[in-house]
Amino acid sequence: MASDSLVFEDSNSVSDLANFLSRAKAIEDDGALLTVRGTALAVYVPVLVPAQLGQGDYTILGMRVHRLAKEAQSNACYSIAAIQDRLARMGQTNTEFIFPPVEENPVWAGITVPMSGWVEAGSVADTELAAAAQSGIDAVAKALPENPGKPVVAQIRQRIWSAEMENTKVSLPLGAAFAMHALGFLSSDGQSRILLQGNWIRVSNGLGHVLLRRSASLL
């Protein structure tokens, strides 16, 4: 049975979730999936999602794990605004999060992310990812026309973030670097692992994870 609430380890864990969601909302305001197994809360957010699944080269999700003080069960998606409202009501010391009353059902939340079978494929310096992210941000800004509509923005973002990073041992799209940068997963002296599983790529470090699903045409 799904739980009615979550109890975080401490107020710092609550603040971490609030900061993560604030960053995610600035990228793509299309909900957050809360998946709980035992005392581990995995929060998934969209970074780059085609208008229809199966279109575009990549679907990119961000994920961060938060620790709970009590075991719970959940696999539900809510609007980021609704989660933020609940977090704000908790105040400075309360660690119990009550789920919002209304669930969301964005298409990306139905994607099944592999939980096992990942194979190590190398690593990349966080400084390289940061530089690649900035080059992509500059390219997107330069390519956007004045007053673009949402379909034009989506097309440009998909094209630029699907382009491969240069000088990396493992093929990695710029979107992976952008997601790691925008979600706050990079550090000045860190390294991020690259893992593969079927048509999935995962970029991971101690701060968070970025998951990329390649379209069938890229395989």
Image (cartoon, rainbow, N blue to C red):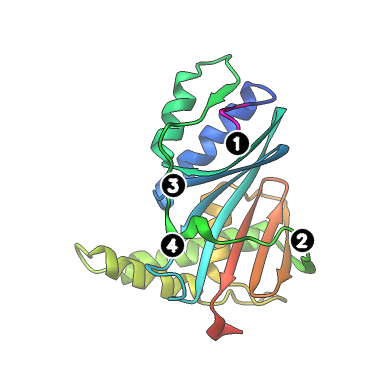
Residue bearing the label numbered 3: 31
The image position of residue 40, as x and y in percent, is 71, 39
Looking at the image, residue 18 sits to the left or right of residue 154; the answer is: right
Q: Which residues are magenta?
A: 1-6
Mark toward the start of the polypeptide (2 vs 4): 2
- The kind of residue tagged 3 is Gly
Mark 3 element type:
loop
Magenta part, dominant SS: loop
Q: Are marks 3 and 1 in contact (CB under 8 Å)?
A: no
Q: Nearer the viewer, residue 1 or 54?
A: 1
Looking at the image, residue 62 sits to the left or right of residue 89; the answer is: right
Q: Residues within 10 Å of mark 2 (few under 14, many from 20)?
A: few
Residue at left 60%, top 31%? Answer: 3
- The kind of residue tagged 4 is Ile
Q: Give the Cα distance between marks 3 and 1.
A: 19 Å
Residue bearing the label numbered 1: 2
Quarter placement of the C terminus: bottom right
- The kind of residue tagged 2 is Ser
Residue bearing the label numbered 2: 116
Looking at the image, residue 17 sits to the left or right of residue 206; the answer is: left
Mark 1 element type:
loop
The image position of residue 199, as x and y in percent, is 64, 75
Residue bearing the label numbered 4: 137
141 is higher (above) or lower (below) than 109 = below
